[in-house]
């Protein structure tokens, strides 16, 4: 094969410029850049099909059904809302510390995980109460740009019909992975964009062109979302290696190309290191998620995901459209395509498909960490390879009848195997009609193209058929995926009256940093503080700190997502410990139909609490102090006073269970105990699911847990002990549950709590100021002992109190600093772990890039001087 294959100008290919205007006479080429035209067409087709699908599904913003399912509503929209607040100067905190979530969390790792894409900045152009529309717009725009990037890549790999590149670019952007997974994980769409761009970087490295632009693209891809950028870089490397093999370059030249590409990637990743290393370090300090094990799906399910309108969270979404699939299947039999090209792309597609199904290679695709969720997050790479294979089948000339016949037979075999899958049986009323119409449009369009000679009407009809087939099946596939997600996952309402009332209530009470304002236990989403304001314990991230999760769990807090989604803990003792001076009480979210419904406005209660920095007599702990088994006693450790009575309890009709896990509850039962009249009753039953209320009155409280330990219930207040001192708690479980045999009930002496609070106030800081990653407190004269900051001791805090700066100590999970005899102030600064190393690596990469650019410029200038002198003399 001619070596110019690598530059996209194989023998027999048309020069850049597009199609012929007429058959006889001089050839006229289109003036417009065909690559740009193809990219625009791909972006247009993608946008229209994506929005049409949401119209069909009656999904937001084109209908009443919410898009905010699962983590989109719980994480990604709230993080974009927090980014909006940062860009408009309204957030509590900055790039280093998010003071609104988790009582103070490291924000830079979250920024790099969720909102570091340049597209995310566009949310600042929208009103705050249209944050859902902003995220939707960003999602559509990213998907469209991915299609445009793929269309441009296809025209760079080999010249061909611009409209065909546009259609196939849209096929890639609207692939099953994009529609089923990335559409509600918008940060993953940056990887969808990155893959074709990184393949272009490989082309430039081969030709020795655009080295600076290549480095910047790599840096941008890894900054936008390093997780999918890693997979995209892996996929682009495979494409580059195949291109080098097909070009039959001398091995020295091939090694030089590989070296240039590796240097480009290395420098680009180095420039992104300040963010990438911080995110990586953040994962090391995060609460461990679920430990999963890879289990490949069956072949019939794998093949079913090649077809439109099939949906499954746990199988690879490989749909790329029937047109692209038929062309990819025709490639091995297409006699106009050189044998090496046919074999090379076919083998690469099959090899990557097999790598999805083998545990070691699946682990390699996922950066050697088992995904906490879908095990096929790399499937977009295979979708890209299928589209590129389809392009090669078309760019060398239309497949003949023999090739199309073979592709049709293979498609029938795929459909026959897929028909045995539960995925097609579940969606058969959608799948088979859409498949038949798409096949008819594809084969009809390709047939008309082969007959179009000199007849533009036939050519136009063929293009219309192919575009129509692609548009229809993509819209149907996206609509089905939207409906299925809504039926199978938790969903959340977009911003509306409820969130606005919450935000207004929070704003009316907010006085940070004098005290915290909790947005409330009856949350709308798991990251309510970022959505409606305030400074709460609620926090849901893949990077939720281990120390935060373990500390709040020890204090009786509940969580979901196996400990990474922390809830609000409605308790006056923990409110005192964490300086929560105002708490919003919301009615249950009416969007969540499973909740007991009740109206009413959002109200605010206020409490007299200690300042954010208190002084304790105990010395700071150099190592984390151990909590005990009782959350009531653990709260007292942090408060520094005994305020609870833990009565002996009896459970009517109890079934004895594992002593360590508690007593079994499988029907309406009653807990009885005796406490001091006037004390407040609390129930701690982390593995109980159902309702609980005091038998003699009080509000009914809902406890949520599950048998898989993905959710545990938070401690909740039930009411006040009556004059007789008898406590009767009625339990109505909604599944087989467990309650602690002893220690479930705690009775709080509110008078003792007020005394403890007044003592902490009298010895606490007289003034506290907070600015992003810096906290400063003015202490009373003569303060000795340990200053304790009501914030989790996440890695990265350093403090000083009248002396040298030292790493902050820990007081039962909180920041602690030993005070000298002359300390009158405390200053703590936060440096995210990995930032210094990342900055050093980024700086070294930047200096290297500048040095290489300077040397190259000097060499070019030196090389042109002789020529310049000759011209002048002449």
Image (spheres, grey):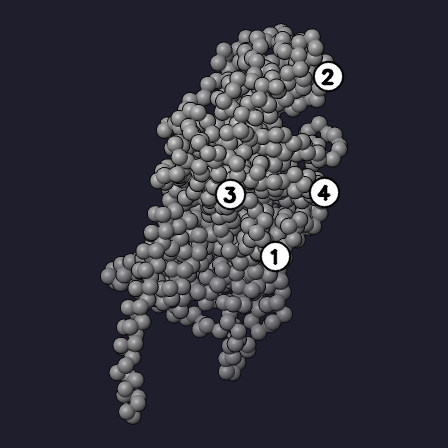
Placement of 566 over or under 129, stated as above or below: above
Discs 3, 4 touching: Cβ within 8 Å:
no
Image location of residue 136, percent across then percent down: 61, 51
Residue 770 image label = 3
Residue 697 image label = 2
The CA distance from mark 3 to mark 4 is: 31 Å
- How many residues crowd around disc 1 within 10 Å: few (fewer than 14), some, or many (20 or more)? few
Q: Nearer the viewer, residue 828 or 452?
A: 828
Q: Nearer the viewer, residue 466 or 633?
A: 633
Which of the marked residues, 2 or 3, is nearer the chain's N terminus? 2
The secondary element bearing badge 4 is classed as helix
Number of labelled discs? 4
Image location of residue 674, percent across then percent down: 63, 8
Placement of 252 over or under 362, stated as above or below: below
Q: Residue at x 48, y 38 (%)?
A: 778
The secondary element bearing badge 1 is classed as helix
Q: Residue at x 53, y 73 (%)?
A: 32
Q: Return the residue at label 1.
A: 125
Which of the marked residues, 3 or 4, is nearer the chain's N terminus? 4
The CA distance from mark 1 to mark 4 is: 22 Å
Which of the marked residues, 2 or 1, is nearer the chain's N terminus? 1
Residue 497 image label = 4
Residue 658 in sight in this render = yes
Which of the marked residues, 1 or 4, is nearer the chain's N terminus? 1
């Amino acid at each position: 094969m001619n070596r110019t294959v690598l530059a996209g100008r194989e023998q027999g290919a048309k020069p850049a410029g597009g199609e012929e205007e007429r058959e006889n006479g001089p050839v006229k080429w289109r003036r417009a850049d065909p690559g740009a035209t193809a990219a625009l067409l791909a972006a247009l087709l993608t946008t229209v099909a994506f929005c049409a699908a949401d119209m069909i599904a009656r999904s937001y913003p084109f209908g009443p059904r919410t898009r905010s399912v699962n983590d989109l509503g719980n994480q990604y929209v709230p993080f974009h809302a927090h980014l909006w607040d940062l860009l408009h100067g309204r957030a509590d905190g900055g790039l280093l510390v998010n003071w609104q979530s988790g009582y103070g969390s490291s924000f830079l790792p979250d920024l790099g995980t969720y909102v570091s894409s340049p597209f995310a900045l566009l949310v600042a152009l929208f009103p705050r109460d249209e944050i859902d529309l902003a995220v939707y717009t960003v999602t559509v725009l990213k998907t469209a740009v991915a299609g445009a990037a793929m269309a441009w890549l296809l025209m760079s790999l080999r010249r061909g019909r611009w409209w065909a590149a546009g259609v196939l670019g849209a096929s890639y952007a609207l692939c099953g992975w994009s529609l089923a997974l990335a559409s509600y994980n918008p940060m993953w769409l940056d990887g969808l964009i990155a893959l074709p761009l990184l393949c272009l970087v490989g082309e430039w490295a081969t030709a020795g062109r655009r080295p600076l632009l290549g480095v910047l693209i790599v840096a941008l891809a890894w900054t936008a979302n390093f997780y999918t950028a890693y997979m995209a870089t892996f996929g682009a490397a495979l494409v580059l290696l195949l291109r080098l093999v097909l070009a039959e370059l001398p091995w020295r030249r091939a090694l030089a190309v590989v070296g240039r590409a590796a240097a480009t990637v290395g420098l680009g990743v180095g420039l992104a290191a300040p963010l990438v290393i911080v995110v990586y370090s953040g994962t090391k300090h995060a609460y461990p998620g679920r430990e999963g094990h890879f289990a490949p799906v069956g072949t019939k399910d794998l093949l079913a995901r090649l077809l439109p309108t099939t949906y499954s969270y746990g199988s690879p979404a490989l749909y790329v459209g029937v047109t692209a699939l038929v062309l990819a299947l025709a490639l091995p039999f297409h006699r106009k395509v050189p044998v090496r090209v046919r074999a090379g792309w076919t083998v690469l597609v099959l090899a990557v498909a097999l790598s999805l199904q083998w545990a070691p290679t699946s682990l390699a695709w996922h950066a050697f960490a088992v995904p906490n969720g879908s095990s096929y997050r790399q499937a977009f790479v295979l979708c890209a390879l299928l589209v590129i294979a389809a392009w090669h089948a078309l760019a060398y000339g239309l497949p003949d009848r023999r090739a199309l016949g073979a592709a049709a037979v293979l498609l029938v075999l795929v459909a026959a195997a897929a028909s045995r899958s539960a995925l097609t049986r579940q969606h058969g009323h959608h799948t088979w009609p859409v498949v038949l119409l798409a096949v008819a449009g594809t084969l009809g369009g390709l047939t008309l193209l082969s007959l179009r000679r000199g007849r533009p009407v036939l050519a136009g009809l063929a293009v219309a058929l192919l575009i129509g087939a692609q548009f229809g099946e993509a819209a149907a596939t996206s609509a089905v995926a939207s409906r299925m997600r809504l039926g199978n996952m938790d969903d959340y309402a977009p911003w509306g009256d409820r969130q606005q009332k919450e935000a207004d209530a929070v704003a009316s009470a907010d006085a940070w940093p004098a005290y915290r304002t909790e947005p409330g236990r009856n949350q709308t989403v798991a990251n309510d503080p970022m959505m409606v304001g305030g400074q709460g314990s609620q926090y849901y991230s893949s990077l939720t700190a281990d120390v935060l999760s373990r500390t709040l769990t020890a204090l009786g807090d509940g969580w979901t997502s196996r400990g990474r989604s922390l809830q609000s803990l409605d308790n006056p003792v923990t409110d005192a410990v964490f300086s929560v001076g105002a708490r919003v009480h919301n009615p249950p979210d009416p969007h969540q139909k499973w909740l007991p419904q009740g109206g009413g406005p959002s109200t605010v209660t206020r409490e007299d609490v200690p300042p954010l920095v208190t002084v304790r007599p105990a010395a700071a702990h150099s190592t984390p102090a151990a909590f005990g088994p009782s959350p009531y006693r653990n709260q007292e450790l942090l408060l520094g006073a005994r305020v609870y009575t833990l009565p002996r309890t009896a459970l009517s009709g109890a079934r004895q269970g594992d002593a360590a896990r508690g007593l079994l509850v499988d029907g309406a039962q009653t807990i009885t105990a005796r406490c001091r009249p006037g004390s407040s009753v609390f129930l701690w039953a982390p593995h109980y699911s159902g309702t609980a209320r005091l038998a003699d009155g009080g509000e009914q409280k809902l406890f949520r847990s599950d048998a898989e330990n993905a959710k545990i219930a938070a401690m909740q207040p039930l009411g006040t002990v009556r004059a007789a001192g008898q406590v009767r708690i009625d339990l109505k479980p909604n599944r087989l549950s467990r309650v602690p045999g002893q220690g479930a009930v705690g009775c709080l002496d509110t008078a003792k709590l007020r005394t403890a609070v007044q003592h902490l106030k009298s010895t606490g800081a007289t003034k506290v100021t907070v600015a992003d990653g810096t906290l400063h407190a003015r202490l009373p004269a003569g303060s000795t002992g340990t200053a304790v900051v009501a914030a989790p001791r996440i890695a990265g805090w350093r403090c000083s109190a009248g002396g040298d700066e030292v790493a902050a100590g820990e007081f039962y999970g909180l920041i602690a600093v030993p005070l000298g005899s002359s300390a009158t102030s405390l200053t703590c600064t936060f440096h995210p772990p990995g930032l210094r190393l990342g900055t050093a690596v980024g700086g070294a990469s930047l200096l290297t890039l500048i040095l290489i650019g300077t040397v190259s410029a000097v060499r070019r200038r030196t090389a042109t001087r002789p020529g310049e002198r000759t011209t002048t003399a002449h």
